[in-house]
Image: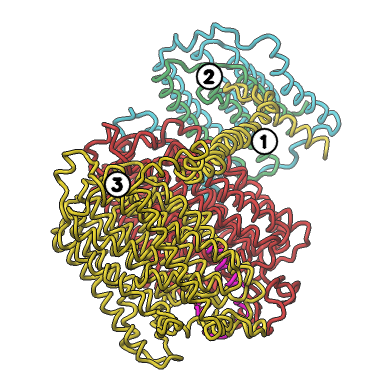
């Protein structure tokens, strides 16, 4: 493909935020805050604008040819191991690029207000820009290794931003935890990459990059025998990044970071990287029904598991965090049942309303003088009108109320789960949807209704946030409202434009399946058939989930706004054990601590270091061999007595013996 | 004549050696050593090596031993002389004695077996005269001669370096 | 009895053994150095004797070399001794055990 | 300039020695000695750049050869040569040289000229070891490295410096002696000490095994491979900063370099027999080093144990016997030199200010020393192999190579285990970072510590730049070493062609279209292509 201006643009989408980060990072406090903020927002803004440009260009191309690529240089080139430093754009990552830079831009603007008084203002924006750079590398990377670069990069930024206020040891610990748990996932990712590389290498033609997505897709047939192992390893990576069971534990702790960070990284963009990766590798995942099942089951389990925990949390951000984990579970579920497009659809809508909710909560926290406990909030509806209204939109969208964004994507996921033939998965998702509505209403009621329970001093300071903060809220609210309309499904008379847009990316996977298995009953085929035959069922399910969502909201309202006794009763139910179980997040952290961390530490310190290193190797082997020498040399030791005359005598004896030997041997 | 001189010089030389070793006082040891060296010069003379004999007296007796005596005097003789302690613990004497005795026995046995060896023949004209030695020294052995001069130079520098007080050295 | 080469060699051996024994027995470092000189002298006698046997002056040259070595050795050795004496106030080798172990 | 470029290797090697002699004898004033040492080290670096730019990587053979008969009618010769592997390591050495000297500007106050002389002397010995193509010459340089290091640790070290120095000396000595026996054996077989003649010797399997064991022992101690590593933490902890940097930056690579250059090409049978053992030890080293590093109370000791872990990666890569793995190993040597060198320098910076390295003494340093904390963070990330920094490329290639290795039994299991080292690396480094830099500045003694001075910046910035540079453009190095690795390890990789059918042995690639297979190369063909 000849080099085209739009293709060169791809690298600048990635590089401009890096330049912003470099400027902010290197100049740091020498830069006035206004300049710094402008620079950072400008960088992301440029990136966003460029994304739109290339998106439009992509949209202008014929469907089958929608692909742009920009090879900067060879990165690792050694023998047949050729990996390019390259970027590519297809419909899938075009969507992701728009979401990341768009939402990222809004959050940058929001941060201008939120972080205005922070001493580390420049550092914050440096990190934030760095994050956009890493995320765009992840999204636009042309091959798996570039994706991995971004993958690690966003992990790093997440680490830096979570422990941004490192004065508090807990924040630092949370950041470290996030990084390390992600590293465990990366471990799987790396191995998955190795397996792919080793498997595909013999089949590569000349000039084909080793881990390039296009090449891999082309050689998917060769990868088929190893597909299950590869997919499970890659999925381990995804569970780390997208906070799925069993590696979800870092995300709630990650709320220690500044709220815009939670919105950007831990809700809208980075955590969806796992979903993106699974969708990106769809051509492999569809080859392995077993892996797909694992993805779906883990997704569904995470969805319900996190939703139940969210029921009992008192920290406003923790509720949202568990909600995020739960929603990520939905996305995985979608991918697992083969509905990658729907999963990505939910990524997009979720990015809108979850970013909105987080920013809204940030606005609340800002108003409440950095208080995050909902038990001391309440009655903020009047005092924070913009926040309240936008928050309401976000809540409804998340609860899946028609016609907001969340409805379309979540409903699609549930429908695909249902039509995939596994009704249990659907049922789990369905229950979790109700729980979602319930806990969101609980959050809403505790925060915005009733009497304010804060101390008078805090109460005095409550005020609506500045324009830089409310404007992004409004924009995101609008997006949450209308964002789902691009994907109105066929049965409602919509065009399912979103799915169609992504069709070229995921169709490839289906073709691979057909090629590999020769079967026609692939997910795509089944879904397409269902569209024509089963619209009644779709209507019923859609209605049911809408009603179920409303019911959840209503129940939440009743329990928390009207009859708090019910909540109290639930707390004491069965001796209070279930409640405590939920409140302590099923004791997962404690279990990990007790099974891995503490024994590992003990093992290292006592056994490995003190016993093996100092005791066995140094004590017995090294100094022991010295002891052997000493025992043997207890005789020799006499010789080493420092007496010159003794040495002289030794020489005479030696010479004498030598002379004797010469005489008698000759 | 030669025989008498040999026995005389040889016996006195061994006596000088033994006295050197056995005298407690370092000064007296040194004097006995000088005596032994002079006798050794006699031996050299008997062996047709007049130049070496002269050099033995000049260099050894005149230079090296004077140096020894000088040092002994400098180091406060009395301190050196008080080898009051026994030289060796009694049980160790056999250990010291065995190697020399073994060598002597060996030499004795060797002579008994193979007999003595005569010099035989005559030496060339001017053998051992300064001119002959000089010809060798500056001809065949010129390289060794030069090397020895370097050895001496190094020794001079080394002795200076060691002897001078540490902080006065140029590089300290 | 005619004096043969063997006589000279035995004489040299005796002198050498004397020096060697003295080196082992004595504690005074200066006397030890003198014993070394004795041993060197014994070697010189052997050189000269063999030189006479072969009628070759090379042995004489080597004796001269030995003189130089002996001189160098004496110079360095005595310099070291002087330095040691300055620091330790003794030249008794039994007291000089810094090298032990 | 011809007289320099004609004997460029000699100049590069012996210029530091010249400098050290000058410093020992003439320039005895502290300041002048420092300036002279720095000048000499910089000049040496500039000279080595000549090597970098004039080396022709395509051929991969020894270049800039200098050969003068030395002893025994030329059976032993002064034979220097340089191929890609030597090149990159030599340039790393000369690159670190000026930085090390600059880092001692304030740290060493006692007997400055002596110290600098030893540092330069050490540099000559290290460069000579990389260039020597005559085994006796190699051995001379190899042993010569011990002497200055012994003094650097023993004279300018910490509390237990004598113990550490003696331990270092004896450990290394023990290994070297066996190697010397091996060299002599080969010498009598080959009739010459030249490496090329050694390579030409046809050895039976039995002697090969013994000789390989003798050689590998010497190198494994130097690396150090797992059970032989206990000298390293002691040496590092007691050594002055400059000593640690040289030790970690270059000296440890002598072991792995020796494996690539000598042990592996000389004894293919030995490699085949010992590769499983070595790779298992390497993996144990990776995990073990990481776990033990995790619990260290002393920052420097932690970094020292992390070296054990990282060098385990290198050894694993080498014994994967795949081009990618070996190249990754060589690359990792560089990356480790940069990142760990930087870490030791950084530890030295704070040690200069606080005279302690106990992690518990610190906390919240990022408040007082933000620039220092940033550079430390970058070095930490490079050390744990973050993509975009140098450490990643090496680790990736090593693990990738090992994963695809066909000669190594259980290669995939080993890779999986080794890859846990990546996770553990993040744990111990970040935990240390957290305890030292984050949190509140609770210890009063840490208040008012100055941030990095200009001099310290000058020392650290080049390292940081190269961490990024190599991370983004690894081709810089990979291009230089590719042909050399194939050439050097041709004897080892050759059996793979004979013993394994290209397709059948491949677990998952079975039944495919019969394309060429990873790893297996035809050395003869490659040789002709050069």
Badge 1 density bin: few <14, some 14–19, many ≥20, Cα 10 Å: many
| Residue at mark 2 shares a chain with residue at mark 3 | no
Query: Over which residues does the magenta segment extend?
Result: A189-213
Nearer the camera: disc 2 or disc 3: 3
Based on the picture, tell me whether residue A479 belongs to the magenta stretch. Answer: no
Chain with yellow colouring? A
| Residue at mark 2 shares a chain with residue at mark 1 | yes
Q: Chain of mark 3?
A: A
Answer left or right for B103 relative to C91.
right
Whole-percent x and y of residue A18? Answer: 29, 68
Q: Residue at x 41, y 16 (%)?
A: B75
Residue D158 found in image quarter:
top left
Task: Find numbered disc 1 in the image and state the secondary structure of the residue it sits on.
Answer: helix
Nearer the camera: disc 3 or disc 1: 3
For chain C, give the colour.
Answer: green
Pick the quarter of the image with the C terminus of chain A: top right
Q: Earlier in the sequence, mark 2 or mark 1?
A: 1
Q: Residue at x 45, y 23 (%)?
A: C81
Image position of A414 with respect to A571: above or below: below
Residue D516 found in image quarter:
bottom right
Whole-percent x and y of residue C66? Answer: 55, 36
Image position of D77 with respect to A78: above or below: above
Chain with red colouring? D
Chain with cyan colouring? B
**Residue D60 shows in the view:** no
Disc 2 target residue: C93
Disc 1 target residue: C49
Disc 3 target residue: A372
Mark pair 2, 3: CA separation? 83 Å
Answer left or right for B135 relative to B160.
right
């Amino acid at each position: 493909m000849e080099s085209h201006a739009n293709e060169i643009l791809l690298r600048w989408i990635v590089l401009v935020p890096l330049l912003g980060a470099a400027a902010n990072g290197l100049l740091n406090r020498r830069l006035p805050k206004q300049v710094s903020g402008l620079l950072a927002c400008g960088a992301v803004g440029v990136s966003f604008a460029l994304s739109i440009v290339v998106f439009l260009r992509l949209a202008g191309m014929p469907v089958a040819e929608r692909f742009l690529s920009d090879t900067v240089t060879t990165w690792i080139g050694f023998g047949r191991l050729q990996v390019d430093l390259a970027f590519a754009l297809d419909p899938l990552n075009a969507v992701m690029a728009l979401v990341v830079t768009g939402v990222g831009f809004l959050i940058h603007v929001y941060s201008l207000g939120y972080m205005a008084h922070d001493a580390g203002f420049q550092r914050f924006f440096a990190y934030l820009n760095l994050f956009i750079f890493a995320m765009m590398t992840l999204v636009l990377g042309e091959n798996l290794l570039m994706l991995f670069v971004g993958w690690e990069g966003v992990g790093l930024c997440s680490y830096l931003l979570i422990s941004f206020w490192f004065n508090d040891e807990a924040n630092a610990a949370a950041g470290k935890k996030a990084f390390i748990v992600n590293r465990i996932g990366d471990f799987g990712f790396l191995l998955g990459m190795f397996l792919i590389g080793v498997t595909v290498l013999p089949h590569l033609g000349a000039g084909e990059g080793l881990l390039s997505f296009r090449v891999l897709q082309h050689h998917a047939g060769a990868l088929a025998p190893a597909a299950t192992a590869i997919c499970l390893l890659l999925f381990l990576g995804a569970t780390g990044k997208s906070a799925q069971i069993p590696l979800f534990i870092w995300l709630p702790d990650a709320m220690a970071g500044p709220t815009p960070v939670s919105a950007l990284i831990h809700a809208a963009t980075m955590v969806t990287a796992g979903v993106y990766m699974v969708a990106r590798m769809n051509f492999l995942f569809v080859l392995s029904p077993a892996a797909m099942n694992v993805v779906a089951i883990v997704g569904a389990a995470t969805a319900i598991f996190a939703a139940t925990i969210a029921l009992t949390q008192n920290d406003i951000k923790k509720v949202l965090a568990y909600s995020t984990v739960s929603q990520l579970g939905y996305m995985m579920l979608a991918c697992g049942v083969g509905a990658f497009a729907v999963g990505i659809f939910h990524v997009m809508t979720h990015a809108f309303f979850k970013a909105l909710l987080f920013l809204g909560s940030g606005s609340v926290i800002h108003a409440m003088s950095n208080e995050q406990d909902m038990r001391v909030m309440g009655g903020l509806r009047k005092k924070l009108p913009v926040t309240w209204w936008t928050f309401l939109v976000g809540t409804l969208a998340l609860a899946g109320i028609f016609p907001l964004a969340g409805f379309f994507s979540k409903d699609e996921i549930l429908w695909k789960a249902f039509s995939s033939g596994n009704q249990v998965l659907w049922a789990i998702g369905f229950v979790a949807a109700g729980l979602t509505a319930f806990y969101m209403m609980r959050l809403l009621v505790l925060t915005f209704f009733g009497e304010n329970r804060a101390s008078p001093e805090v109460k005095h300071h409550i005020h609506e946030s500045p324009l830089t903060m409310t404007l992004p809220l409004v924009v995101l609210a609008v997006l949450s409202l209308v964002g789902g309309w691009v994907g109105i499904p066929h049965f409602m008379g919509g065009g399912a434009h979103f799915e169609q847009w992504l069709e070229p990316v995921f169709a490839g996977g289906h073709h691979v399946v057909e090629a590999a298995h020769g079967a026609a009953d692939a997910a795509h085929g089944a879904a397409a058939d269902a569209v024509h035959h089963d619209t009644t069922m779709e209507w019923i399910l859609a209605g049911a989930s809408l009603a179920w969502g409303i019911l959840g909201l209503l129940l939440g309202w009743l329990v928390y706004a009207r009859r708090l006794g019910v909540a109290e009763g639930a707390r004491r139910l069965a001796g209070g054990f279930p409640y405590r179980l939920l409140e302590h997040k099923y004791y997962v952290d404690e279990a990990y601590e007790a099974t891995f961390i503490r024994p590992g530490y003990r093992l290292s310190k006592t056994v490995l270091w003190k016993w093996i290193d100092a005791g066995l190797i140094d004590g017995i082997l090294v100094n022991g061999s010295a002891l052997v020498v000493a025992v043997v040399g207890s005789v020799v030791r006499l010789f080493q007595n420092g007496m010159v005359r003794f040495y002289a005598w030794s020489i005479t004896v030696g010479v004498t013996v030598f002379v004797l030997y010469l005489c008698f041997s000759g | 004549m030669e025989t008498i001189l040999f026995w005389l010089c040889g016996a006195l030389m061994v006596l000088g050696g033994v006295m050197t070793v056995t005298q407690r006082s370092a000064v007296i040891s040194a004097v006995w050593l000088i005596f032994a060296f002079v006798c050794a010069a006699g031996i050299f003379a008997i062996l047709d090596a007049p130049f070496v004999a002269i050099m033995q007296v000049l260099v050894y007796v005149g230079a090296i031993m004077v140096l020894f005596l000088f040092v002994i005097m400098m180091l406060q003789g009395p301190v050196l002389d008080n080898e009051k302690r026994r030289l060796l613990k009694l049980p160790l004497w056999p250990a010291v004695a065995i190697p020399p005795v073994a060598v002597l026995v060996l030499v004795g046995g060797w002579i008994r077996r193979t007999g003595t060896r005569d010099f035989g023949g005559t030496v060339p004209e001017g053998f051992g005269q300064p001119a002959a030695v000089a010809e060798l020294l500056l001809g065949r052995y010129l390289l060794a001669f030069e090397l020895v001069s370097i050895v001496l130079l190094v020794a001079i520098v080394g002795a200076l370096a060691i002897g001078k007080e540490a902080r006065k050295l140029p590089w300290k | 009895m005619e004096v043969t080469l063997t006589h000279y060699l035995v004489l040299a051996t005796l002198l050498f053994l004397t020096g060697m024994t003295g080196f082992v027995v004595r504690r005074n470092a200066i006397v030890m150095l003198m014993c070394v000189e004795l041993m060197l002298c014994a070697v010189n006698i052997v050189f000269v004797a063999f030189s006479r046997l072969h009628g070759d002056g090379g042995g004489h040259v080597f004796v001269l070399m030995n003189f130089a070595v002996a001189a160098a050795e004496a110079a360095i050795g005595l310099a070291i001794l002087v330095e040691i004496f300055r620091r330790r106030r003794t030249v008794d080798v039994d007291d000089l055990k810094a090298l032990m172990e | 300039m011809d007289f320099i470029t004609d004997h460029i290797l000699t100049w590069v090697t012996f210029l530091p020695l010249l400098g050290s002699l000058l410093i020992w004898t003439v320039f005895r004033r502290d300041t002048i000695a420092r300036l002279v040492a720095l000048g000499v080290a910089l000049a040496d670096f500039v000279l080595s750049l000549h090597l970098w730019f004039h080396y022709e990587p395509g051929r991969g053979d020894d270049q800039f050869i200098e050969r003068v008969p030395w002893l025994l009618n030329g059976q032993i010769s002064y034979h220097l040569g340089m191929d890609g592997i030597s090149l990159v390591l030599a340039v790393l050495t000369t690159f670190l040289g000026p930085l090390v000297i600059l880092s001692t500007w304030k740290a060493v106050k006692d007997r400055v000229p002596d110290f600098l002389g030893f540092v330069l002397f050490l540099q000559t010995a290290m460069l000579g070891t990389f260039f020597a193509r005559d085994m006796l010459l190699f051995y001379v340089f190899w042993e010569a490295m011990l002497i200055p290091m012994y003094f650097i640790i023993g004279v300018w070290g910490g509390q237990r410096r004598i113990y550490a120095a003696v331990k270092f000396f004896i450990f290394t000595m023990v290994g070297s002696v066996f190697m010397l026996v091996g060299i002599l054996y080969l010498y009598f077989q080959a009739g010459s000490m030249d490496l090329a003649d050694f390579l030409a010797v046809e050895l039976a399997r039995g002697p090969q095994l013994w000789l390989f064991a003798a050689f590998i022992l010497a190198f494994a101690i130097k690396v150090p491979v797992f059970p032989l590593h206990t000298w390293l933490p002691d040496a590092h902890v007691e050594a002055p900063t400059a000593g640690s940097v040289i030790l970690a930056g270059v000296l440890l690579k002598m072991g792995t370099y020796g494996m690539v250059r000598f042990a592996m090409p000389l004894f293919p049978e030995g490699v085949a027999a010992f590769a499983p053992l070595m790779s298992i030890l390497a993996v144990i080293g990776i995990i073990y080093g990481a776990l033990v590093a995790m619990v260290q109370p002393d920052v420097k000791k932690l970094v020292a144990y992390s070296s054990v872990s990282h060098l385990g990666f290198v050894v694993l890569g080498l014994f994967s016997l795949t081009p990618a793995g070996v190249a990754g190993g060589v690359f990792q040597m560089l990356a480790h030199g940069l990142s760990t060198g930087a870490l030791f320098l950084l530890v030295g910076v704070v040690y200069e200010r606080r005279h302690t390295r106990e992690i518990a003494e610190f906390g919240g340093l990022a408040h007082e020393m933000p620039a220092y904390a940033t550079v430390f963070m970058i070095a930490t990330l490079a050390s744990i192999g973050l993509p975009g920094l140098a450490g990643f490329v090496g680790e990736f290639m090593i693990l990738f190579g090992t994963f695809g290795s066909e000669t190594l039994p259980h290669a995939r299991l080993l890779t999986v285990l080794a890859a846990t080292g990546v996770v553990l690396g993040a744990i111990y480094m970040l935990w240390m970072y957290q305890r030292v830099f984050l949190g509140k500045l609770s210890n009063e003694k840490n208040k008012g510590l100055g941030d990095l001075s200009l001099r310290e910046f000058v020392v650290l910035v080049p390292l940081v730049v190269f961490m990024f540079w190599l991370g983004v453009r690894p081709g810089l190095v990979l291009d230089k070493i590719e042909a050399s690795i194939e050439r050097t390890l041709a004897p080892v990789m050759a059996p793979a062609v004979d013993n394994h059918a290209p397709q059948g042995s491949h677990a998952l690639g079975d039944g495919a279209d019969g394309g060429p297979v990873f790893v297996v190369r035809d050395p003869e063909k490659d040789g002709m292509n050069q």
